[in-house]
Image (cartoon, coloured by chain):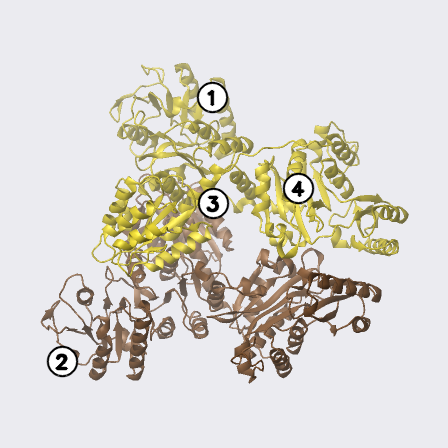
Chain colours: A brown, B yellow
Amino acid sequence: MLSKIMKPKSIAVIGASTKPKTIGSELMQRLRDYKFNGKIYPVNPKGGIIEGFQAYTSIEEVPGEVDLAVIVVNAKFVLDTIDQCHKKGIKGLCIITAGFKETGAQGAEMEKELLAKVKEYGMRCVGPNCLGVLNTHPDVTMDATFAESLPARGDIGFVSQSGALGGGILNILKDLNVGFAQFISIGNQADINAETALEYWENEDDVKQILLYMESIQNPANFRKLATRISKKKPIVALKAGRSAAGASAASSHTGSLAGADKAANALLAQSGVIREYSLKNLFATAKVFSNCPIPKGDRVAIITNSGGPGIMATDAICEYGMQIAKITDTTKEKLRSFLPSAASVKNPIDMIASAPIEHYQQTLETVIADENVDMIMVIYLPFLGLKDIDVARAVMEIKAKNPSKPVIGVFMTTSSFFSELSNMQVNMPFFMYAEEAAEGLHRLNQQRLWQNRPEGKIPCYDVNKSRAQEIIAQSLEDGRAQLTTRESIDVLDAYGIRVCKSGFATNLDEAVNIANNIGYPVVMKMTSKTTSHKTDVGGVRVNIQSAQQLKDEYNDLIQKLTDKGLIDGLEGVIIQEMVKGSREMVAGIATDPQYGPMMMFGLGGVFIEVMKDVTFRIAPLTDIDAMEMIKSVKAYKLLEGARGTTPAQMEQIQETLLRLSQLVTDFPFIDELDINPLLISEKDGVGIAVDGRIKVRAEEAMQSLGLKCTCGSCSGCCH
Amino acid sequence: MLSKIMKPKSIAVIGASTKPKTIGSELMQRLRDYKFNGKIYPVNPKGGIIEGFQAYTSIEEVPGEVDLAVIVVNAKFVLDTIDQCHKKGIKGLCIITAGFKETGAQGAEMEKELLAKVKEYGMRCVGPNCLGVLNTHPDVTMDATFAESLPARGDIGFVSQSGALGGGILNILKDLNVGFAQFISIGNQADINAETALEYWENEDDVKQILLYMESIQNPANFRKLATRISKKKPIVALKAGRSAAGASAASSHTGSLAGADKAANALLAQSGVIREYSLKNLFATAKVFSNCPIPKGDRVAIITNSGGPGIMATDAICEYGMQIAKITDTTKEKLRSFLPSAASVKNPIDMIASAPIEHYQQTLETVIADENVDMIMVIYLPFLGLKDIDVARAVMEIKAKNPSKPVIGVFMTTSSFFSELSNMQVNMPFFMYAEEAAEGLHRLNQQRLWQNRPEGKIPCYDVNKSRAQEIIAQSLEDGRAQLTTRESIDVLDAYGIRVCKSGFATNLDEAVNIANNIGYPVVMKMTSKTTSHKTDVGGVRVNIQSAQQLKDEYNDLIQKLTDKGLIDGLEGVIIQEMVKGSREMVAGIATDPQYGPMMMFGLGGVFIEVMKDVTFRIAPLTDIDAMEMIKSVKAYKLLEGARGTTPAQMEQIQETLLRLSQLVTDFPFIDELDINPLLISEKDGVGIAVDGRIKVRAEEAMQSLGLKCTCGSCSGCCH
């Protein structure tokens, strides 16, 4: 797919130059110095010799076939250059030139033309406005970038959306002993984007982990599909910048106001098995760990140290990540006792004491790696008189080399010169300065293990009354309302098989009493209004009504209050509902992210929702596994389990509620916001019951989709 | 106080040695190489010359006066050595020798004798089992440690409880360009501990910040007093290890089970103005920042960068710490526009674009420092062709030197060789690799600013009915109960002026109806039992009782349920309470930490308490400022402010409730646990009302304190 670009047999550098410190010169030097395993054809109108290669005055003149054209000419010549490349039969482009979409409308127009040509000619194109591509495979050895240093060979496939940052990253990773298999600076990602790269690297054997630096995700649904599949085979680690930029959402629902773009990105990455990092530092640290460690079989960590304090700190950090401090077997303890001094502690953390010589590091590690109760190992070294840190590291790596099956991470609390020295060595395990960094690394390994073991999940399809739901929505739209009434909202939920509480709608007192008598007391009375959406704020909800008399009193009081507040006109009537007994109010909902589409929310509802923010998000549609993970990931899960003598909630029923909601928004993607708040957990049987619901649609989109026409006469088919 | 130890004019090294790689030899070398500004007397039975100094066969023989004896002899000779030091008139000891308390009972006994001698002779003593002391002041230049490298001169006073770690830290800090004024490895802290050091450094002008590595706090009350005062003058930064070791508490109250040693340490440090770090990495980073930055005047940060991506990441991090992205003035913008290229962005973050030359870094920084809307500055550099990172750093430091009044932190995303180079230079500002690290540094500066501006607060003394509270507690103890009944608990709270809800106690139905008629309906009925403490779990709480008839029904139902469950015997009666309307249930309480003493808790109560854990702790006694900070620091504060149309809570009244509780536990320090749950916020007037209370005392301690004797005959004065 991308092989013409990533594994070319010949490269033309269009805009190659002899002028020092220009990109056209740097790029040629890089190709030459990294010893590209193919033909290099510099193209420059002046011809001559560039960096030792015969230059051609035009691409036409190039004698052989060209797989990849790296274009560094001025932006205004790029479109013509693409035409010339086409004439030459070139299918792979890497356009480094800037001056397109990133500069404004005119540039964007030019980029559109560029893409049109690429499509027309059947080419693939990296960039424009990028740093280039590289492939360290011995068959290719291509460095077509202008970063500061030549890349180290390694197992990472790396996609960067930022050119400048990409260059910085290449430098730093090299310094950290982390090497690349392939690198693509996607720049403006006119054609090739992170998803293209993911898909390409899925079957590239020498790419063993994929790193992404992203500022946006172009096609979230496609990204999710690819990442979910590929992350099962190799870790995908992403840094997504721009969290705080998310800004305030103008949404009127709870789900909407708690959502926001970063929540969406977070949800998407989580359910796709992508490990999200929040800083470059952590991105690099994780890459270093995956480069040098196998995925462990479990989460039991052994700590080997020559100092107590760091052992304590390591324990703290490991426990905080929810991993286990391994229980060393008695056999291991005996073996350790046979050579460690009596002052040493053979319980985990294994404290060999400060004077531990190199031999003790080796023997202890060898013994502990063999322990069946140990899945991962942290080796801590604090400088001790007479030992050289780098010698200890070498000795530890020797043992690691003989026992490659379990992850071992070194914590060497020493000076930066140790790490400088390391960066010029071949290593077979990661080293960090601090125990907390190593613990985080182990946590990432464990996270990948858990993801790989996680079942894939299914998106179920329930038997629902879709046409009834559609009718209700259509009616609301015909009435000119994008926001459904409570009654309509509950009816839509009911049509989708969501357990709602028994209720009836009354427009006057007699009807209300009639319905209540049928349902049976106690009941709840709730106003429904076309103008007032937060009912509790205006006293529109009356609970625990025990008799017809009390119902009459409450009804009359409500009418009086609304009249006093001037809100009586919006009143449609009241809903009389069965009173579900239960103190646990959850929330389930849908919000729409402009970029990521419909998103599901679940968590603690009621009055606490906006204060505690104990909610979680996933992008729709949900798999059964996604839905159950949502339920288990909120703190309020403990409430659901039946804290303090309450009835345990029926988790599968709540899971089904989420899945049915997901089906609803999949069927009607124009649903903009939906809240079930509360989803009350019945004390009787632990079932989650939708007691209140609010649905809002994007009117124009909905009307189009349902084939409706607005009758207001004053609009272009939208709702007023 | 410690001047004989920290500023000696003469040092005897008892146990000095010529044998390489021994502590007795390393220490002598260190004193010599660091050019101790005073007399050095090695003492060794063999005499001779040690590291160029005349050795003496005994301390007696030493010709001159000796201020400090550094003792490295075998543990079994230490006590005799102290006697000899006394004969010589030595008042300062630094005992490096290990083999005391840390080895078990026998060692602890020896350490006790050691301390007795030190006290008897009027000496002060660092250690035993420590790394030594150092003072870099030019008048002293003493390195009496055996760490790996000689210390750099700086402004830190550092206390380490771990010897090995202390040595590691000295190395690393030197590598990070951070120097010491003084260092004390307190080891087993038989005599001198962190508090002694704090007090000594309070008035040592060249100690400008204090760093602590602690595994325990010896005297929390004294530590709090000293730290609160001294942290107003200079930052105190602490790393306290051993968080996860806290372990499960067996407490039966909410407050107790949510507490735990690390919460106590956290509370103590927070209310003493000590900045707590959770890793050495962060401890060092913060030290680096305080060493090179003034405390800012505000929290408005300007970001100067040559790359957009890191600018976004910096913004994310700064916002997450709650600091502000400075609004650059128009004057500044104009000035910037006058020299930056048109593609640059002069809005904060100021993006000078990738090609920014050194001059732009200088001019931009100079312009931004002068902006009155800017309190702190982050300068980001990503490698660009042709620029050398270290040159950029030098240029930036040049500007910083001319403008020392505002903190400037550099983010140089380059290789470790840059930082190695830096470590051999004199710097005047901190440099980090990543924006997140710099943001954390700015946050620490801002935190210190806020603490320094925080009023000191007062511990008020309310007029309370102490004798009534004492009577109730005494009665409970005489009845053989360490756990007060609900009624007793509420009465104690009432005696301390805490707003409790109107109530009465009834032992039969007639009494109950009588009381309810007096209070007025609706009322709440709660069982009180000597055997059942979590009432809701057994249906012992009935709310919203509207009439005498309903009260009769509920009462009879309760008796039936308890009889069915076999719990009827413990029943004392029922409390009939006014029904306070309100949906916001808070919790206020007391827990006792075995080491830190009584601790106050406040937060979200009701059924959510253990699930949401939205609570905060402070050590008693509370100041008014502490109490208000507690209220404002929980998420549920938004509920108190009056979210979603509820009545705003009376914050001062809630503050007073906490302060009165604090006074209660100060008066009766044997109160082990106390819960007010819920402290219900009345919808009527926003007052917090103690609706339910539970108090438990430590019986033996309480009986002793109140002069009571147990009458059970089967114990040694404690409760059964």
**Mark 4: amino acid:** Gln
Question: Amino acid type of disc 2?
Answer: Glu
Label 4's element?
helix
Tell me if B78 is positioned left or right of B307 in this view.
Answer: right
The residue identified by callout 4 is B653
- Between the C-alphas of marks 1 and 3, the distance is 32 Å
Q: Is residue B393 above or below residue A607?
A: above
Whole-number angstrom distance, CA of label 1 to CA of label 2: 93 Å
Using the rendered image, report if marks 4 and 3 lie on a common chain: no
Q: Quadrant of residue B476?
A: top right
Q: Say if mark 4 contacts mark 3, CB within 8 Å.
A: no
Name the chain letter of the residue that bears numbered label 1: B
Circles 4 and 2, Cβ within 8 Å, touching? The answer is no
Residue B376 in sight here: yes
Mark 1 and mark 4: span between their CA atoms?
A: 51 Å
Amino acid type of the residue that numbered disc 1 sits on in the rendered structure: Val
Q: Which residue is mark 2?
A: A61
The residue labelled by disc 1 is B118
Please report, as a chain letter, where disc 3 is located. A
Give how far apart the Cα atoms at labels 4 and 3 are: 43 Å
Which of the chains bears the disc numbered 4? B
Q: Nearer the viewer, mark 2 or mark 3?
A: 2
Please state if A656 lies on the left or on the right of B7 as rendered: right
**Residue linked to disc 3:** A312
* Mark 3 residue type: Ile
